[in-house]
């Protein structure tokens, strides 16, 4: 049995319009990735954004926070999107099937389909005065059409009307695909901008309030007002159009004239209902007040260009289709576009003494004037106020500077955070600076450093903590030698009335024991370490002897001269560990070293060695096993020797 995952289902549904969440600077969230932009519009009633993908033939819907809510496919070659004035219907231009599809914005269900009798288009959409307006046709045969949603096709009347612009018999008209724009606060005003092919400088404003376009102004000719139209917007509250994001042309008396533009060069723009302008230039989006020359808010939207942008109806965000490194486009939501972002600095001393007064200074500045007497909130965060303690608010001086004093009660890292809550024209902003505030040194000791213990000894390690402010907790860690045994916490707790805390460590290896005091508001943290050493467990067993008897006061294993002793060593096992056998022979009253050789241990920790038979009698020898730190294959224990075992060879 096979199943299909939700992610796979979405990929099949959306084609190349995979959905993802991204962010940018002060942007709130982001929504869909598209291969080829096919329209962008924001719904103020539902707080949604609709994004078309021409390549995939899809429209995706997200909320203002970037959550994908719905999607619809089958919109072949979708090239533009627009909402009705009451935001009850979303219209999509489907070039592939030469129709306009009406969708329910809440569900993206299809409400109606309006076929357009053309071989090219429909291309661009606009809605005003109760009608949907669209452009269609190719070079030399472009035109304007409309859809009357109030007409029921079942009545026998076609709601689609074609050939509404140009004006037949005159030079006024379209010769290719044309951009459209409306102003929600000026119903019936429709701007038209020629784009593509020749005559891309042609533009018009028409009055469509009657349902039939009436020419208000027309421009066609020599490119003196623009150098080709790639973007066209009606300027809110004025008889002007904004061309390519920065050229302002006024219209009156049937003609267009160049007006003074307050905006720098750009590629495209969108105008909010209140006249604010969002301008895109490369990878930067900048907002301006209606007649302002200074930028209000500037955003970086990546490393590449911007294909489209639109305002949220409430002006709370600007939504941008920004190009990605893979060649597609991603939707980004830019927050607070009508608020200037102030610059706030905080300068605190790099270090200071605890319980001594210090001074913090800074400055609040903005492109646009801040309210007189602006207040700043101040928060101090330290070891005793980990969630922050509010300090008295600070008033900004007329020159934007401010200062305040504070006496830090706690040592360690102290952070002063200064915040401006924002106002109607300025976004909230905050900044901080850190101060290293002194703390008293802490007395902490740990015993047993450098001591050597037998294998497996239970050793008590005692840490002693001197006088501190509040914290009386010490943590003790054990770190046995060898990469296979990690450092671990043995005990943590408060010291007793004598300042001591004790743990017992099983000394099977050399071990670093550390005691850690985390510090408190008045005493610095401290760590001390004691390294103690552990021997291995080692013993030897001798076989093949015929008796055991003393020679003088020393007990010997007796062997016939032709018998070979077997020496079996048992030693604490460790991977790749070797024992060393030391052999000495007695001659003329002294012991002389005969040989030392290393032998590998089995996983049971044993190694048996055949010494061989000397073949002559009267020989005294002795032998021992040893673990040599660093030479026996590892360094996790301290050098350890077994007792000598004595051998005698007789006839």
Image (tube, rainbow, N blue to C red):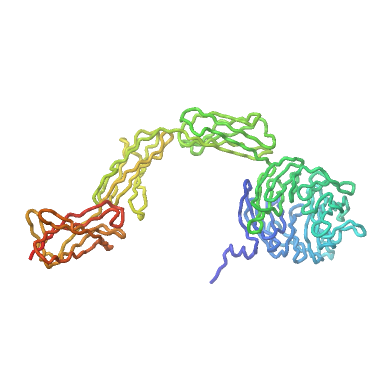
Of all residues, the one furthest to the front in this rendering is 588
Residue 352 percent location from the top left of the image = 48, 31
Residue at image location 68% in from the left, 52% down from the top? 320
Of all residues, the one furthest to the bottom in this rendering is 1
**Residue 50 visible in the snapshot:** yes
Position of residue 613 relative to residue 488, above or below, is below
The answer to whether residue 116 is left or right of residue 373 is right
Q: In which quarter of the image is residue 136?
A: bottom right
Position of residue 517 relative to residue 310, above or below, is above
286 or 52: nearer the viewer: 286
Residue at image location 33% in from the left, 51% down from the top? 481
Residue 100 percent location from the top left of the image = 77, 62
The answer to whether residue 517 is left or right of residue 200 is left
Of all residues, the one furthest to the top in this rendering is 357
**Residue 209 visible in the snapshot:** no
The answer to whether residue 158 is left or right of residue 68 is right
598 or 645: nearer the viewer: 598
Check the picture and name the quadrant holding the C terminus. bottom left
Residue 367 percent location from the top left of the image = 68, 37
The answer to whether residue 340 is left or right of residue 353 is right
95 or 172: nearer the viewer: 172
């Amino acid at each position: 049995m096979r199943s299909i995952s939700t992610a796979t289902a979405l990929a099949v549904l959306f084609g190349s319009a995979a959905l993802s969440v991204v962010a940018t600077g002060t942007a709130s969230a982001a929504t869909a990735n598209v291969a080829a932009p096919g329209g962008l519009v924001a719904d103020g009633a539902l707080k949604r954004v609709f994004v078309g993908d021409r390549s995939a033939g899809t429209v995706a819907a997200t909320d203002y926070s970037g959550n994908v809510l719905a999607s619809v496919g089958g919109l072949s070659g979708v090239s533009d999107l627009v909402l009705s004035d009451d935001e009850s219907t979303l219209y999509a231009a489907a070039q592939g099937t030469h129709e306009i599809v009406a969708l329910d914005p809440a569900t993206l269900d299809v409400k109606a389909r309006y076929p357009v009798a053309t071989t090219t288009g429909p291309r661009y959409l606009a809605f005003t005065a109760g009608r949907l307006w669209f452009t269609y046709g190719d070079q030399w045969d472009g035109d304007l059409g409309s859809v009357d949603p109030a007409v029921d096709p079942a009545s026998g009347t076609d709601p689609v009307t074609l050939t509404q612009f140009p004006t037949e018999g005159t030079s006024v008209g379209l010769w290719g695909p044309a951009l459209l724009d409306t102003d929600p606060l000026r119903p019936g005003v429709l701007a038209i901008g020629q784009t593509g092919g020749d005559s891309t400088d042609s533009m018009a404003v028409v009055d469509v309030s009657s349902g039939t376009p009436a020419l208000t102004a027309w421009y066609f000719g020599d490119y003196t007002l623009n150098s080709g139209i790639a973007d066209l917007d009606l300027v809110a509250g004025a008889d002007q159009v904004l061309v390519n994001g920065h050229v302002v042309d006024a219209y009156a008396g049937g003609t267009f004239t160049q007006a003074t533009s307050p905006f720098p060069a750009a590629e495209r723009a969108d105008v909010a209902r209140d006249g604010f302008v969002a301008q895109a230039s490369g990878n930067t989006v900048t907002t301006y007040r209606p007649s302002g020359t200074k930028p209000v808010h500037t955003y970086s939207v990546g490393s590449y260009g911007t294909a489209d942008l639109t305002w949220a109806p409430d002006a709370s965000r600007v939504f941008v289709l920004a190009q990605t490194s893979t060649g597609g486009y991603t939707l980004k939501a830019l927050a607070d576009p009508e608020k200037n972002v102030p610059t706030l600095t905080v300068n605190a001393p790099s270090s200071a003494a605890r319980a001594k007064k210090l001074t913090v200074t800074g400055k609040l500045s903005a492109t646009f004037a801040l309210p007189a007497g602006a207040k700043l909130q101040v928060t101090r965060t330290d070891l005793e106020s980990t969630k922050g303690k509010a300090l008295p608010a600070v008033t900004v001086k007329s020159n934007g500077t401010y200062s305040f004093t504070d006496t830090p009660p706690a040592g360690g890292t102290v952070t002063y955070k200064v915040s401006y809550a924002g106002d109607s024209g300025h976004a909230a902003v905050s900044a901080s600076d850190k101060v290293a505030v002194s703390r008293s040194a802490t007395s902490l000791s740990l015993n047993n450093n450098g001591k050597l213990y037998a294998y497996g000894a239970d050793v008590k390690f005692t840490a002693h903590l001197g006088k501190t402010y509040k914290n009386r907790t010490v943590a003790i860690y054990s770190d046995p030698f060898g990469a296979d045994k990690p450092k671990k916490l043995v005990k943590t707790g408060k010291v007793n009335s004598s300042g001591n805390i004790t743990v017992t460590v099983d000394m099977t290896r050399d071990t670093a024991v550390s005691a850690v005091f985390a510090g408190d508001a008045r005493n610095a943290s401290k760590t001390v370490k004691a390294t103690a050493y552990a021997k291995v467990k080692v013993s030897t067993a001798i076989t093949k002897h015929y008796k055991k008897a003393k020679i003088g006061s020393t007990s010997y294993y007796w062997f016939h001269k032709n018998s070979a002793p077997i020496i079996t060593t048992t030693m604490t096992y460790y991977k790749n560990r070797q024992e060393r056998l030391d052999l000495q022979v007695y001659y003329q009253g002294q012991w002389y070293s005969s040989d030392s050789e290393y032998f590998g241990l089995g996983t049971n920790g044993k190694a048996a060695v055949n010494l061989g038979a000397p073949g002559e009698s009267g020989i005294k020898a002795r032998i021992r096993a040893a673990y040599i730190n660093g030479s026996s294959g590892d360094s996790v224990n301290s050098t350890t020797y077994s007792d000598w075992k004595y051998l005698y060879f007789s006839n």
